[in-house]
Image (cartoon, rainbow, N blue to C red):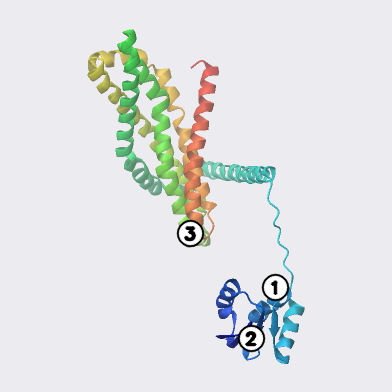
Amino acid sequence: MELKKQKDTFIISGSLTYKSLPKLLELKKKENIKSIDIKNAALDTSAALFFLDLKEEDNIDIFTTDKQDRLFDIVKSNKKKSVYNVQKKSFFYKVGLFSYNKAYEIFLFLEFIGEIFVNIFKYIKNPKKLRFKAVVNDIERMGIGAIPIITIISFLIGVVISYHGSIKLKQFGANIFIVDLVGISVVREFGPLIVAILLAGRSSSSYTAQIGIMKVTEEVDVIETMGLHPFDVLVIPKILSMVVSLPILTILADIMGILGGLVVAYASLDITPYDFITRLNHAVGIKTFIAGMIKTPFFAFLVATIGSFKGFRTKKNVDSIGNNVTISVVDSIFAVIVADALFSILFSWAGI
C-alpha cells in the first residue's frame, strides 16, 4: 500500500486487503479526508466495504474504475445492516437475570446432590465397588496435609479469644470464667467453623481445579469411554474422605484452641494449667462437644460437593477454571456459614 497526497485528494495505490485495514483506519482518524483516489489500487471485498462506508456514511468522494464500481455494487448488494441494541440494561433487569441464573444453578446443584445419593446407595448395597485406595489417598492429601495450618490457626484463635476476654474479666474479678469462654466458643463454634472454612479454601478449590482441568483435557470423557461413571472416580471418594477428615481435624482444632487459651490464661490471669483443666471439665459438657461435632459431617459434605460441582460446571477453557475455582471457595464458605447459622437456630429450639 502506497499513499500520496495531491491538494485535498489522497491517492492510494498497491494491494489493499484486510491486512491494510489498520493503516486505513489510522488514516481515517488522523486526517481530514475530502476525497480519495483508488484507481491504481487492487481491492478485496473487505477494503471495498471500507471505502463504501466512507462514501455512504462519511460523504467522502471515492474515485474508482469501472471494475472497482462493479465490485462496490456486489459488496453493497450483499451488505447486511447491523442493528445494535445499545439500550442500557435497567437495575431490575440485572437483578432478575442474576436471580434467574442463581436459581438455575441451585436447581442443577440439587440435581447433582440427588445423583450423589443415588451413587451412595449403590455403594451401600455393594461396598466392594468403592475405591478405598482413592479415599485413603485423598484423606492423606487433604486431611493430613492440612494439619499444620489448622494447628497454627486454631492455636492463634484460642489465644485471641482468651486475650480479649481476659481484658474484661479482669475488671470484674472473674478470671476463672475465661475457661468457659474459650472452651465453649472453641468446641461449639470456632473449632468446626474454622476447620470447615480452611478446608473450603484449601480442598474445595483443589477439587474444582482438578476436575476442571480433567474436563479441559477431556479426561472426563475418557473415563466415560472406559465405561466408568465420573462420580465413582472423582466425586464419591472426595466426599467420603472429607467426611472422615473434617471431624478428626475438628478435634485437633478444639485441642489446639483450648491450648492457646490455656497459655494466655496462665500468662495474663495467673490461672494454672491444673485449675484451667479442672474448670474445663465443668464448663464444657458432652452436649457442647456433640453440638460442635454433629455439624462437621454436614460441613464436609457441603465443601466436597460444591468443589466437585463447580469442577463439572467448568467449560473447556482456562479462564473458566480460574473463575470456577474462585466461585467454589466463596460458595463453600458461604454455605458453611449458612449451615452453621441454621444449626445454631436448631440447637436453640432443641435447648442444647
235 to the left or right of 100: left
Q: Which residue in the structure is indicated by mark 1?
A: 58
- Which residue lies most toward the top here? 173
Q: Quadrant of residue 294?
A: top left
- Looking at the rendered structure, the secondary structure element under dot 3 is helix
Residue placed most toward the observer, 330 or 238 = 330
The answer to whether the residues at label 3 and label 1 have Cβ atoms under 8 Å apart is no
Q: Residue at x 59, y 79 (%)?
A: 18
Q: Residue at x 50, y 50 (%)?
A: 324
Residue placed most toward the observer, 132 or 184 = 184
Q: Is residue 311 visible?
A: yes
Mark 1 or mark 3, which is nearer the start of the sequence?
1
Amino acid type of disc 3? Val
Q: Nearer the viewer, mark 2 or mark 1?
A: 1
Q: Which residue in the structure is indicated by mark 3?
A: 318
Amino acid type of disc 2? Leu
Q: Nearer the viewer, mark 3 or mark 2?
A: 2
- Looking at the rendered structure, the secondary structure element under dot 2 is strand
- Looking at the rendered structure, the secondary structure element under dot 1 is loop
Mark 1 or mark 2, which is nearer the start of the sequence?
2
Q: CA distance from mark 2 to mark 1?
A: 20 Å
Residue 350 in percent (x, y) is at: 53, 17
Q: Which residue in the structure is indicated by mark 2?
A: 43
